[in-house]
Amino acid sequence: MHPTVIIVPTYNERDNLPRMVAKLLSLPVGVDVLVVDDNSPDGTGAIADELAAQHPAVHVLHRAGKEGLGRAYLAGFHWALEKNYEFIFEMDCDFSHDPDEIPNFLKAAQSADLVLGSRYEGGIRVINWPLKRLMLSRFAGKFVKVVTGMPFSDPTGGYKCFRRRVLQALALDKIHSNGYGFQIELTHTLWRQGFTVVEVPITFTERTQGHSKMAGGIINEAFWLVWRLWLQNGLRRSPRKKL
């Protein structure tokens, strides 16, 4: 068992999963992989089981149905904490998140509690996105910063590395958001508690296999969540304390 686990949620990712697992297992740093499959109709779960049978570093968590990205990650977090991993990643299966960036995350995590992969730190690094989606993402980041005060360029991004102790500090069962909102809520909760959060630049590439799962409800959820987080922080735009 390695100290690092990459949580990869899947729903209809049969074309991407074998390639992703092969890439992760070939990295210069050793990692374990947890596939969290939401009962994919295309048989992704069965493929994950085959990969786990072939590779001791691959594990599979089957869920009864599709409940959203946030619920999948929370299930993965609980599993990873029970297994005593020190570094716990969120990562998409569709190669929009480059696995080759993982060593950079781990290097930053030596002096940070949460490492955020940023598409906008020091410039825009997004490939094959339509202008409308890029503008939506940039507006969302600026909106979160204005309302909450979080000084991060990409608070909605889903490529993250958590130290074990920060996930232990979260009341995971009280987190109910999904999608963009889930990413914002996790980061804001840890930031306002005084944990060290840093960004590392990444290049985001739109998927070439499968279909995006983003929907209008995810955007609406995130909008109202940002105001709720501000209220939870006592209308403050800074952390409550420093650890």
Image: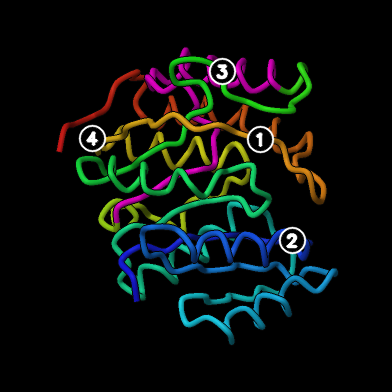
| Upstream in sequence: badge 1 or badge 2 | 2
Q: Amino acid at mark 2?
A: Tyr
Compare marks 3 and 1 and give the one earlier in the sequence.
3
Among numbered discs 4 and 2, the one appearing first in the sequence: 2
User: Label 3 vs label 1: CA separation?
Assistant: 12 Å
In the image, 72 versus 224, the foreground residue is: 72
Asked if the residues shown at circle 1 and circle 4 are in contact, with their CB atoms under 8 angstroms apart, the answer is no
In the picture, measured across the screen, residue 153 lies left or right of residue 71, that is: left
Q: Which residue is mark 1?
A: 205
Tags 4 and 2 touching, CB below 8 Å:
no
Residue annotated with mark 3: 124
Amino acid carrying mark 4 in the image: Gly
Point 54% across, 57% down: residue: 73
Residue 39 spot, x, y in % from top left: 75, 72
Which disc, if any, is residue 194?
4
- Residue at the spot of label 2: 11
Above-or-below relation of 103 to 41: above
Please report contact status of discs 1 and 2: CB closer than 8 Å, yes or no.
Answer: no
Q: Earlier in the sequence, mark 3 or mark 2?
A: 2
Q: Position of residue 233 (x, y in %)?
A: 35, 28
Vertical side of 74 occupied by 95: above or below:
above
The range drawn in magenta is 134-163
Q: What's the distance in space between the residues labelled 1 and 2, CA to CA?
A: 19 Å
State the SS at label 2.
loop
Work out how far the residue at label 1 is from the one at label 4, CA to CA, in angstroms: 32 Å
Relative side of 114 to 215, left or right: left
Q: Nearer the viewer, residue 101 or 39?
A: 101
